[in-house]
Image (cartoon, grey):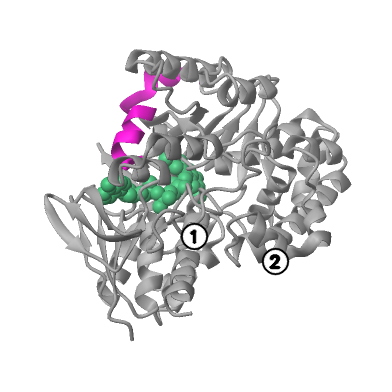
């Protein structure tokens, strides 16, 4: 049993997973969190009888979360209740076509036939996706590979080429599917990591498998119940969490970190794990020089941000499913505008979640609660948009939803809450308001994020969306488990 002390900066899912996994490995662990509650971007808003998931609303790969509980001798089902959703998503197109996604092949085939997509194309595409997933999962995900050297050693030259390295995600989709409908739908799986299907490497086509093989889940009462469950687990296994405790500095001595300062007090640590994103942490806590930051910025461009619009309605829209996508008429343009021109898109693809379709506790009877999330560019600090710019964009979103069938939406709003990229940056210290950490871009980083161990200080580690394997709830939880393994291997070789 080690007596060493590890401090985790930040109680996002990545930080919580690292803290629990390190405690399980025998360390004394404490967490310092700047906000008044744990969970980070996994956040909740309760107002006027409505409950909104302010952050994530789609849960995938729950077996990764389950490990946090089983390795502590507990059962996740004693902490929160999962429910598989049908359909997974409903997709609305500008011409009035609506298509649902189902993991059951017969149901999916019926949807494909509606628009003349041969069901065999979908089956072939999902087989291609599953092969990419299995390949990516055994090394990049589960072995926690961090860079090209790790990759080459783990996979060897032959397996390496099975990653479909010479195509973009969109080219991989196009090669398998023939209708614009299904091309747009499967391109938009890139939403899970806030990137562009035209810039992401083809192996990101592994993403549909996380849904089609492992299902898509809701947590009864709202996804914030995951954070509540983890809070209970932390208390049971003895990990103290200091809330309202923003870390302002990490102290260093001779190539090592020695502890940190929170609320004006120094706390010594043998090892520090930062769940604050890599670039903000080096800039603000470690005062890294400009040249080093510039070298990180070149590879670790932020993923997109989002406008998070929560609406409490006095009615229900019967045509909505739990998860809905309202597609852009020009999705290529949407990706180009957000990820290359870095401008607000004229006609974005919009994600809309209506948890009230599944869960009667999140809205008053007969009412819907909607969370609406168009992906938009991260903050450009040289030419920042104003709150008014974002609110004008919000109006454009509501216009589009009204046009695509949510008749008189404006008139039915009885509660409204808006989070803009600057709000997101301020709340979570995320780099330029990014919501998924680092972008997956085949030209900039081939989808690699930062390594888990600092290149400057050997006893400083990172966890979360800016670190491999990247953003999304299951990935940051996996990252927390992998960083714990890495620390144990480094500390007790
Ligand atoms: C609107 C939205 C929708 C999303 N939808 C989905 C979805 O449907 N499915 C999905 O899987 N993922 C989704 N995501 C992404 C997912 O939420 C994130 O990838 C994941 O929760 C990030 O976890 P993290 O641990 O990396 O970081 P965070 O959650 O950002 O946690 C970092 C923590 O560190 C704290 N912190 C930062 N600096 C300091 C400091 N100096 N001192 C102390 N504490 C500090 C922050 O307050 C925060 O609590 C969504 C995100 C958003 C915002």
Asked if residue 393 is positioned above or below residue 233 in the image, the reply reads above
Q: Which residue bears the numbered disc 2?
A: 154
Is residue 361 visible to us here? no
Q: What element carries label 2?
A: helix
Pick the residue in front: 235 or 102.
Answer: 235
* Residue at the left extreme, as displayed: 264
Pick the residue in front: 472 or 348.
Answer: 472
Quadrant of res 134: bottom right
Q: Any magenta on residue 418?
A: yes
Quadrant of res 103: bottom right
* Residue at the bottom extreme, as displayed: 1
- The local crowd at label 2, few if under 14, some if 14 to 19, many if 20 or more residues have their Cα within 10 Å, is some
Bounds of the magenta span? 407-429
Q: Is residue 208 left or right of residue 233?
A: right
Q: Any magenta on residue 125?
A: no
Q: Indicate the position of residue 273 as horizontal and vertical percent values.
A: 36, 60
Q: What element carries label 1?
A: helix
Lower position in the chain sequence, tag 2 or tag 1: 2
Q: Which residue bears the numbered disc 1?
A: 479
The answer to whether the beta carbon of the residue marked 1 is less than 8 Å from any atom of ligand 1 is yes
């Amino acid at each position: 049993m080690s007596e060493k002390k590890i401090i985790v900066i930040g109680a996002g899912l990545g930080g919580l997973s690292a803290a629990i996994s390190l405690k399980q490995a025998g360390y004394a662990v404490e967490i310092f969190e700047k906000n008044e509650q744990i969970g980070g971007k996994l956040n909740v808003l309760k107002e006027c009888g409505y409950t909104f998931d302010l952050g994530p609303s789609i849960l995938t790969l729950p077996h990764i979360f389950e490990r946090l509980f089983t390795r502590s001798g507990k059962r996740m089902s004693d902490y929160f209740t999962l429910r598989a959703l049908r359909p997974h998503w409903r997709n609305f197109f500008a011409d009035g076509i609506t298509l649902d996604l189902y993991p059951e092949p017969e149901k999916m085939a019926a949807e494909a036939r509606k628009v003349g997509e041969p069901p065999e194309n979908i089956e072939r595409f999902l087989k291609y996706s599953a092969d990419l997933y299995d390949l990516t999962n055994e090394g990049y995900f589960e072995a926690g590979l961090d860079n090209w050297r790790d990759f080459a050693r783990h996979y060897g030259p032959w397996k390496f080429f099975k990653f479909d390295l010479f195509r973009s995600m969109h080219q991989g989709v196009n090669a398998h599917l023939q209708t614009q409908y299904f091309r747009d739908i499967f391109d938009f799986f890139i939403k899970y990591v806030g990137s562009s299907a035209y810039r992401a490497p083809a192996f990101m086509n592994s993403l549909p498998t996380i849904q089609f093989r492992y299902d898509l889940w809701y947590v009864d009462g709202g996804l914030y119940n995951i954070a509540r469950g983890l809070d209970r687990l932390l208390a049971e296994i003895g990990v103290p969490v200091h809330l309202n405790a923003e870390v302002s500095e990490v102290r260093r001595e001779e190539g090592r970190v020695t502890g940190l300062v929170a609320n004006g007090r120094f706390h010594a640590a043998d090892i520090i794990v930062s769940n604050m994103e890599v670039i903000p942490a080096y800039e603000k806590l470690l005062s890294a020089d400009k040249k080093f930051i510039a070298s990180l910025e070149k590879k670790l461009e932020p993923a997109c941000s989002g406008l998070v619009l929560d609406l409490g309605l006095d009615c229900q829209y019967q045509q909505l499913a739990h998860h809905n996508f309202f597609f852009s008429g020009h999705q290529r343009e949407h990706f180009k505008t957000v990820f290359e021109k870095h401008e607000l898109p004229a006609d974005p693809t919009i994600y809309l979640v209506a948890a009230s379709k599944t869960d009667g506790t999140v809205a008053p009877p007969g009412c819907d609660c909607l969370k609406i999330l168009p992906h938009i560019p991260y903050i450009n600090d040289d030419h920042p948009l104003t709150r008014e710019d974002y609110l004008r964009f919000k109006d454009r979103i509501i216009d589009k939803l009204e046009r695509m069938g949510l008749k008189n939406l404006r008139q039915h709003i009885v509660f409204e809450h808006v989070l803009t990229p600057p709000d997101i940056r301020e709340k979570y210290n995320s780099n330029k308001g990014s919501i998924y950490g680092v972008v997956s871009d085949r030209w900039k980083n081939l989808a690699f994020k930062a390594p888990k161990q600092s290149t400057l200080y050997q006893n400083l580690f990172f966890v979360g969306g800016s670190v491999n394997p990247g953003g999304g709830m299951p990935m940051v939880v996996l990252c927390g488990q992998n960083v714990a393994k890495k620390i144990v291997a480094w500390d007790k070789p």
